[in-house]
Image: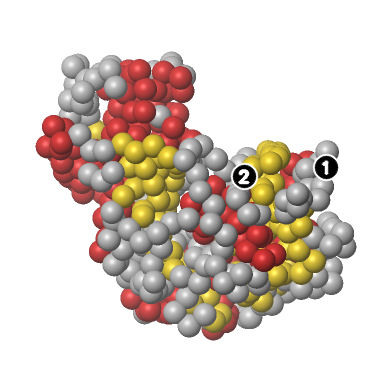
Amino acid sequence: MTDRVLVAGVDSSTQSTKVVVCDAGTGEIVREGRASHPDGTEVDPAAWWAAYEEATSAGLLDDVRAIAVAGQQHGMVALDEDRAVVRKALLWNDTRSAGAAAELVQELGGPQAWADAVGTVPLASITVAKLRWFAEHEPDLADRTQEVVLPHDWLTAQILGSGSTAGVRLVTDRGDASGTGYWAPSSGAYRTDLLARAFGRELGLPDVLGPHEAAGTTASGMVVGAGTGDNMGAALGLGLGPGDIVVSLGTSGTVFGVAEAPTADPTGFVAGFADATGRFLPLACTLNAARVIGAALHMVGSELADLDRLALSVPDTEGLVLLPFLDGERTPALPDAKGLLHGLTRANATPAHLVRASVEGMLCGLSDAVDALGTSGVAPQRIVLIGGAARSTAVQQIAAGLFDLPVSVPEPAEYVALGAARQAAWTLSQAETPPEWSRGESVVLPDRDSADYYRRVRSSYSSVLSGAQPLLR
């Protein structure tokens, strides 16, 4: 009997490092490791390496032939001439660069110019806006900076250099590069003129590798894949096909699907990213997702275990609408917004109504994102619901109603890390296509008897959002 080949995938997210070791042929998970990251919107990258070492300790990577990293998108890691980190990495959820993003949009001639150039209109989350903020607010540190990389790029280099990036070739992939604001999916090339516009001068950038091109080999002989962004990793881990729209309910909410051609949305709602297979990944992201439900449960003195009981104990919210912008918002672009509860009466002033309103409000914002993907040329046929909140029966049922589509709920797994592992297996094999891995799923269909109610929910949410705009800015 031939020993199976093992590969590993790393999910270096905002909150933690998760590592899965898989059978390269089947995707069966053999071992797993995890370690936490510090909280905040800026983090010393050394914390990611420490978490990686902790997560892979106790022989987790024994006999692993290849590894790849999927990391949180957009983070700005600035390096000096010796490859030392110049300042803490600014993460995707750091909104201090909102003004810089608006300046860049105006300077280039408006949103359409950016959509045409790189497929994405800069927001506070996008790397190019962070570089403008950095150059303007920390000029001494900016002067020291010679190269800029993304979180997954930095961690990939650390793995190749066994804890040091010195002398290591810096690489990225087209998926993560497409979230910087200075790499164009349509041409597959950097727009260094846009980087220089933001930062005041050009910087060294990582080489962009192909989907299954190796970044190198570690001293122990482990092949290291190009890696990718976390959303691209999830798409690869889920094996998305045409018409599949992922709705991911984690710290942030993300909506994305694969496309055969690049997209360019001048409204800025949909980012025209590339994926990890050579295709494209139009995506919309909200800052507020599962934590909205957590906040509502906290307000009523309940725990996560009470979510389904409370949210399903009432058939509707009786007019209660929650705008879920508790941490500002990326999409729509309301970085300074606060949450808003509308339509409160004595009849709906109950824990059950508030918790249900939090689920509906979170999902209404994501329903707008699904609609936006549809107008960008991705025809939704089913929703693939993932993330911690996706395990809730209430979330699944309300999602099917609000999206008015079948909702597929894959069995719980670390799909970002699985996508990275699948890329590692693909890199090791050098086959034409990634290996075929499958996972179980359940399906929730829309309740046709509730269709009118959910249409009213969508309409009420849109009306409240439109009327509340002056309060949210």
Residue 141 appears left or right of 362? right
Whether residue 254 is visible here, answered yes or no, is: yes
Q: Which mark is residue 119?
A: none
Residue linked to disc 1: 59
Viewer-nearest residue: 246 or 45: 246
Residue linked to disc 2: 28
Task: Establish if 90 lies above or below 249.
Answer: below
For this orientation, the residue located farthest to the front is: 1
Mark 1 and mark 2 in contact (Cβ < 8 Å)? no
Viewer-nearest residue: 327 or 13: 13
Give the colour scheme shown.
secondary structure
Quarter of the figure with residue 162: bottom right
Q: Nearer the viewer, mark 2 or mark 1?
A: 2
Task: Establish if 453 lies above or below 417.
Answer: above
Where is residue 343 drawn, in percent x and y?
A: 19, 29
Q: Residue at x 36, y 72 (%)?
A: 264
Q: Amino acid at mark 1?
A: Gly
Q: Secondary structure at mark 1?
A: loop
Dot 1, crowdedness within 10 Å: few (<14), some or many (≥20)? few
Dot 2, crowdedness within 10 Å: few (<14), some or many (≥20)? some
Mark toward the start of the polypeptide (2 vs 1): 2
Where is residue 70 drawn, in percent x and y?
A: 61, 56
Q: Residue at x 57, y 43 (%)?
A: 414
Q: Residue at x 15, y 41 (%)?
A: 455
Q: CA distance from mark 2 to mark 1?
A: 18 Å
Q: Amino acid at mark 2?
A: Glu
